[in-house]
Amino acid sequence: MLWEGVHQCLSLPRWNGLILRRTFPELEQSQIQRFRASVPSELYKWNGSKYIATFMNGSTLRFGYLATDDDVINYQSDEYGFIGFDELTHFSFHQWTYLTSRNRSTTGFRPNM
């Protein structure tokens, strides 16, 4: 999942991706640690206070968490071409449906179908 988000961000200019875990400690100990250890730092700039990697083509990969159903508000108005739920079964149905409504993009990208 992490590599799919990185691949999309590197391949598509101005693309936004989001990777989620249920809690921040889980996020930090898994996805963030894995990303920082395996993706070459010259490919992105890291914002450690917002947990966002900005790639040289303007794409971003954000790392977030949803500890409670109310945390979905933190993603209100956001748009993500890629959303990865790490351990989807740990999220509530409300969290999943709300976040999938953020799965949209205004970059003009049209997949070949």
Image (cartoon, rainbow, N blue to C red):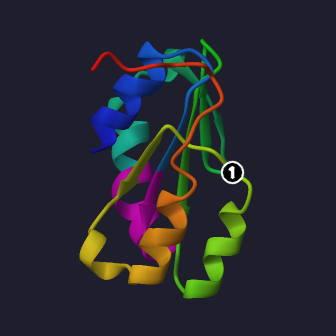
**The image quarter in which residue 89 lies:** bottom left
Asked whether residue 99 is drawn in magenta, I would say no
The residue at the point 39 percent across, 30 percent down is 6
The residue at the point 38 percent across, 20 percent down is 111
- The N terminus: image quadrant: top left
In the rendered image, residue 72, in percent from the top left (x then y), is placed at 62, 73
Q: In this view, does 104 lie to the left or right of 49?
A: left
Q: Nearer the viewer, residue 43 or 94?
A: 94
The residue at the point 63 percent across, 22 percent down is 107
Main SS of residues in magenta:
helix
Q: In this view, does 25 lie to the left or right of 84?
A: right
> Does the image show residue 65?
no
Q: Nearer the viewer, residue 50 or 101?
A: 101
Q: Which of 73 and 44 is in front in this view?
A: 73
Q: What stretch is highlighted in magenta?
A: 19-32
Number of other residues with Cα within 10 Å of mark 1, as a class: few under 14, some 14 to 19, many 20 or more: some
Residue carrying label 1: 78
In the rendered image, residue 109, in percent from the top left (x then y), is placed at 51, 19
In the rendered image, residue 70, in percent from the top left (x then y), is placed at 64, 85
In the rendered image, residue 69, in percent from the top left (x then y), is placed at 56, 86
Q: Nearer the viewer, residue 106 or 62?
A: 106
- The C terminus: image quadrant: top left
Amino acid bearing label 1: Asp
Q: From this view, report whether residue 14 is shown above or below residue 104.
A: above
The residue at the point 45 percent across, 18 percent down is 10
Quick one: SS at disc 1? Answer: loop
